[in-house]
Image (tube, rainbow, N blue to C red):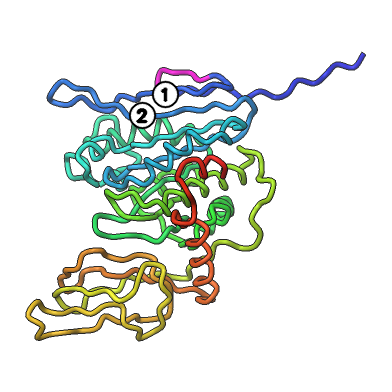
């Protein structure tokens, strides 16, 4: 009599002092600091261990404590019914920089940037210790990573992914994420991406929206993008009707356009706009109406980032332009993306997302 072969079973995964068995999900609190009020701070981690084997993916947000879209992306993702069919394991960390999140600040109390503090040290600064905990307990136990960001205070980003696209694994992740724009971004010393790359763990960044604000389009696109990547990694079943055609275009280069003089800024283009060389992006004027100077595009491209403040000093970054081999194609993809994710076209937030 033939024996039936057993279905392979996923391995348990241990985070902190908690071991999560296949088919289970657990909340884990990683101790990171004790305040001078004798209050302990913990980094929250949701660990999902699928029944069947597959990759281990980490998903992180709020490495900069005031960048909130990623927190909401992770919250919605963890409610998505697709995760019932998870293969492998998902390590979801909605708030990495707990100090900054509490203070609504990009930085830590010592004014260090956590994303320039990796791999960190168990005996170093506040930032170094936090980076060390995240690296050892989450990143080094993963095979892939997606790090969720927004623009800084008063600076908004068009939804985009950033990665070292020379790595075939990251190019595949970036194209499957299906943001309208992908930027081939160099690694920076001390960043999470650079530190993970040294350990052969491909990590991609999703940038969308601005700090201390929820942007519904960015959140919807981010959650769908994460699900797309998980499907591409065979962590989730494929869609019955996958989207057809190319949905992402790679920027050849990007450049910030800076204020030629100080004054009041009156913008004349929106995020995602196509501009041609010499087109007016904004007018800088003085409050008395005696002076005006145009800010013009140095080349044809798409506006993928923009400052929100209507005031500028000479040299301030105003607009982030991306150059493409086919700007027309990039413009069409941005328009299609906006139409497909426009909250005004859908009745409610979460019920629709649960069907995605």
Q: Residue beneath label 2, please?
A: 44
Residue 134 position in % (x across, y down) = 37, 34
Q: Residues within 10 Å of mark 2 (few under 14, many from 20)?
A: some
Tell me whether the residue at label 1 lies in contact with that at label 2, contact meaning CB atoms closer than 8 angstroms: yes
Q: Quick one: SS at disc 2?
A: strand
Q: Residue at x 44, y 36 (%)?
A: 139
Q: Position of residue 4 (x, y in %)?
A: 83, 19
- Quarter of the image for the C terminus: give it: top right
Is residue 172 rendered magenta in the image?
no
Please tell me whether residue 18 belongs to the stretch shown in magenta: yes
Left or right relative to 245: residue 346:
left
Residue 350 vertical position relative to residue 333 in the rendered view, above or below = above
Most distant residue in the right direction: 1
**Residue located 27% across and 37% down the image:** 128
Q: Residues within 10 Å of mark 1 (few under 14, many from 20)?
A: some
Quickly name the residue at label 1.
27
Q: Earlier in the sequence, mark 1 or mark 2?
A: 1
Left or right side of 20 for 241: right
Span highlighted in magenta in the image: 16-20
């Amino acid at each position: 009599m033939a024996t039936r072969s057993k279905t392979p079973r996923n391995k348990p995964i241990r985070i902190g002092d908690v071991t999560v068995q296949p088919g289970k999900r657990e909340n884990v609190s990683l101790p990171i600091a004790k305040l001078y009020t004798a209050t302990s701070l913990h980094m929250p981690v949701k660990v999902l261990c699928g029944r069947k084997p597959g990759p281990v993916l980490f998903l992180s947000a709020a490495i900069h404590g005031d960048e909130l879209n990623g927190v909401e992306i992770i919250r919605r993702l963890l409610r998505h019914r697709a995760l019932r069919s998870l293969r492998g394991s998902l390590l979801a960390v909605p708030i990495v920089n707990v100090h900054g999140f509490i203070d609504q600040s990009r930085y830590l109390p010592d004014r260090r940037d956590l994303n320039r503090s990796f791999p960190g040290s168990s005996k170093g600064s506040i930032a170094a210790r936090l980076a060390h905990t995240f690296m050892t307990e989450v990143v080094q136990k993963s095979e892939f990573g997606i790090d969720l960001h927004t623009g800084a205070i008063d600076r908004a980003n068009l939804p985009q992914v950033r990665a070292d696209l020379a790595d075939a694994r990251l190019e595949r992740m970036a194209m499957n994420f299906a943001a309208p724009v992908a930027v081939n971004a160099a690694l920076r010393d001390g960043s999470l991406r650079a530190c993970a790359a040294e350990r052969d763990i491909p990590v991609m960044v999703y940038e969308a929206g601005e700090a201390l604000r929820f942007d519904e389009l960015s959140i919807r696109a981010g959650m769908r993008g994460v699900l797309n990547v998980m499907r591409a990694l065979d962590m989730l079943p494929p869609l019955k009707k996958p989207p057809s055609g190319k949905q992402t275009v790679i920027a050849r280069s990007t450049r910030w356009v800076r204020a030629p003089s100080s004054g009041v800024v009156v913008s004349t283009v929106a995020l995602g706009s196509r501009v041609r060389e010499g087109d007016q992006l904004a007018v800088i004027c003085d409050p008395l109406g005696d002076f005006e100077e145009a800010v013009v595009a140095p080349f044809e491209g798409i506006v993928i980032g923009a400052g929100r403040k209507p005031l500028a000093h000479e040299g301030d970054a105003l607009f982030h332009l991306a150059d493409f081999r086919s700007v027309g194609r990039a413009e069409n993809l941005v328009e299609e993306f906006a139409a497909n994710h426009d909250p005004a076209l859908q009745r409610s937030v979460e019920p629709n997302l649960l069907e995605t």
